[in-house]
Image: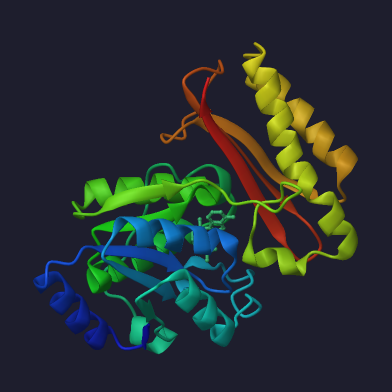
Amino acid sequence: MKVISKISQMQAIMKQERMNGRTIGFVPTMGYLHEGHLTLLQRARQENDIVVLSIFVNPTQFGPNEDFDAYPRNFERDEQLAKKAGADYVFYPDVEEMYPRKMSVAVTVTERVNVLCGKQREGHFDGVATVLIKLFHIVTPDRAYFGMKDAQQVAVVDGLVHDYNFPIELVPVETVREKDGLAKSSRNVYLTETEREEAPALYKSLKLAKERIDSGERNPEAILSFMKDYIQTHTSGIIDYIEIYSYPELKEIDTLEGRIIIALAVKFSKARLIDNMTWTV
Ligand code: AMP
């Protein structure tokens, strides 16, 4: 496994790999790897000749009051895990390498973005789209792997890949969870012991909501009010949002039918957790 921090070197190697007829699977991350990331890597390993992992805490997707500086980082540990998971290349640039000067062309995401995290985190998906355009050009993957834990990100990347004709297959991967149901996240380390005990209630609320819908409930408001009560009763977190939309369009729906997403974000003292479920009713 090779660690590469320069864009020009990465581009030269990827060009060579493509000339040799190798398919490239790409897993973009912000590091502090956990089983969720490793599952994406394993999937990429199965489906491609070459697996590239990128580790870059992207400043342009963090708001001014968000946790860019505090975001957990541990490159040595990530390197070991990536090696074990079978990555061939780790692209690990610094901020100066990725953003050497003010960008002269800005990217604005206009669809699938005025809801959920997009509404709460202004400019977040513009930053995600910006860095992905750069990474896609640098890595030139055949397939790119994204976790459904960030379902809105998958919807936005789906729009990006189609609108700008990236010859890339977007592969969404199911959310990987702890035994008690909590979605694995680099931010879970910031939960206090009590919050960690409460946090599985988020997934539980989604599962109970799904049960109600699968048993015939069709009114989104009834589901939202049930989930709000459940989370308020079972956690000390503050609800940022709980919302239901069509998926991947992320449009409001009056009746629960077709492919839907129920997504939530809850703020604990030092970590904001997100989770969701998508399925066809
Ligand atoms: P991040 O490092 O948080 O930007 O995540 C990098 C990629 O890993 C994204 O595509 C995430 O959706 C995905 N990911 C993060 N957590 C999980 C999880 N628990 N299960 C599956 N994929 C995940």
Q: Does residue 42 sit above or below 50 in this rendering?
A: above
Residue placed furthest toward the top: 216
Q: Nearer the viewer, residue 259 or 110?
A: 259
Residue 146 drawn at (x, y percent): 43, 54
Direction from residue 110 to residue 181 in the image, left or right: right
Residue placed furthest toward the left: 19
State the residue at coordinates (58%, 82%).
77
From this viewpoint, is residue 56 visible? no
Q: Does residue 24 sit above or below 98 in this rendering?
A: above
Residue 83 drawn at (x, y percent): 46, 78
Direction from residue 172 to residue 256 in the image, left or right: right
Question: How many numbered discs?
Answer: 0
Q: Nearer the viewer, residue 85 or 54?
A: 85
Q: Does residue 190 sit above or below 125 in this rendering?
A: below
Residue 67 drawn at (x, y percent): 64, 72
Residue 85 drawn at (x, y percent): 47, 70
Residue 232 falls in image quadrant? top right
State the residue at coordinates (76%, 68%).
190
Q: How is the image coloured?
A: rainbow
Direction from residue 133 to residue 11 in the image, left or right: left
Q: Nearer the viewer, residue 41 or 123?
A: 41
Residue 193 falls in image quadrant? bottom right
